[in-house]
Image (cartoon, rainbow, N blue to C red):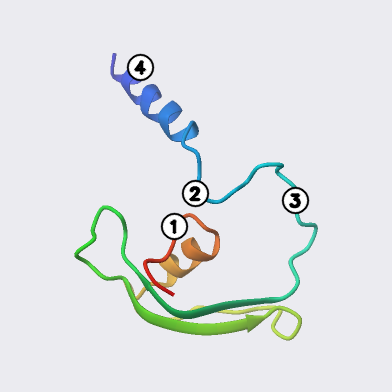
Amino acid sequence: MTIMGASDKIFEIMDTVPKINTEGGSKIPECQGTIELVNVKFHYPSKADVPILKGVSFSVDNLKNKVVALCGTSGCGKSSIIGLIERFYDPIEG
């Protein structure tokens, strides 16, 4: 019964329609351009009272910078920034 309950949750997640319009499913062969975050503020949906990013701004041009590193202490938002870039989450502001 536990396995069936867990599988229901998996199917629920798989059936979730993302906020981003992904209709058509076209794949971009290679990303060229600039990734820019401007005054991004973010908190995880389950912890709205805990701010993760409080106005982060930076720009990366992939034609000039082939390798980029996000550095910082544990808990400073590195993984959250990647999650936002990959559109796992949407920013609160910015």
- Amino acid type, callout 2: Lys
- Residue picked out by circle 2: 19
Q: Secondary structure at mark 3?
A: loop
Cα gap from disc 2 to disc 1, whole angstroms: 10 Å
User: Which of the two discs, 3 and 4, sits closer to the camera?
Assistant: 3
Residue 34, placed above or below residue 6: below
Crowdedness of circle 4 by 10 Å Cα count: few (<14), some, many (20+)? few
Q: Which residue is mark 4?
A: 4
The amino acid marked with disc number 4 is Met
Q: Amino acid at mark 3?
A: Lys
Could you tell which of marks 3 and 4 lies nearer the N-terminus?
A: 4
Q: What residue is shown at x 66% (from left), y 42% (from top)?
A: 23
SS under mark 2? loop
Residue lying furthest top in this view?
Answer: 1
Task: Answer with the quarter of the image where residue 5 lies.
Answer: top left
Residue matched to label 3: 27
Q: Quadrant of residue 3?
A: top left
Does 33 sit above or below residue 29?
Answer: below
Chain-order first, disc 2 or disc 1: 2
> Quick one: label 1, few (<14), some, or many (20+) residues within 10 Å?
some
Name the side, left or right, on which 48 lies relative to 13.
Answer: left
Please report whichever mark, 3 or 1, sits nearer to the chain's N-terminal start. 3
Instruction: Tell me if residue 83 comes above or below residue 38 in the rendering.
Output: above
Earlier sequence position, callout 3 versus callout 2: 2
Which residue was labeled with disc 1? 89
Residue appearing at x 29%, y 13% in the figure: 1
Give the amino acid at mark 1.
Tyr
